[in-house]
Image: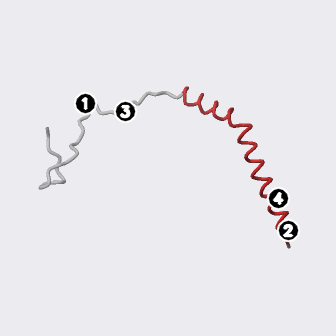
Amino acid sequence: MLTFAVIVTAICLAILGAIFMRIVVTGPRVRAEIHMAFQTRSTNAQGATSSAKTPVAPCNPARRYAHEVTSS
C-alpha cells in the first residue's frame, strides 16, 4: 500500500514539474504574443460615448413619476 502511495505521489509531482517547466520555457513567447495582440488591437471606441445627437437620460428621475423622463 505504501508503494502504491509513493508511486501516485511521484506521478503527481512529475506532472506538476512538467507543467512548471512548460510555463518557464514557453512563458516569454506567450507574453510576447499577448503583447503583440494588444498592440495591433484598435483603440477605436466607436459608439461608446454619447454625443449631442443622442441625449442621455437623467441618472435620477423625479421620485413622483419614476417612470417618466423629464426633458432638459
Looking at the image, the residue that sits furthest to the bottom is 1
Residue at image x 26%, y 34%?
Answer: 54
Task: Give the residue type that dot 1 points to.
Answer: Lys
Image x and y of residue 3, in percent:
88, 68
Depth order, front residue of 41/28? 28
* Residue that numbered label 4 is attached to: 10
Image x and y of residue 36, in percent:
60, 28
Q: Do labels 4 and 2 touch, CB within 8 Å?
A: no
Decide which of tag 3 and tag 4 comes sooner along the chain. 4
Task: Give the residue type that dot 4 points to.
Answer: Ala
Q: Distance between the residues labelled 2 and 3?
A: 62 Å
* Residue that numbered label 1 is attached to: 53
Tag 1's secondary structure?
A: loop
Mark 2 or 3: in front is 2
Tag 2's secondary structure?
A: helix
The numbered mark at residue 4 is 2
* Residue that numbered label 3 is attached to: 47
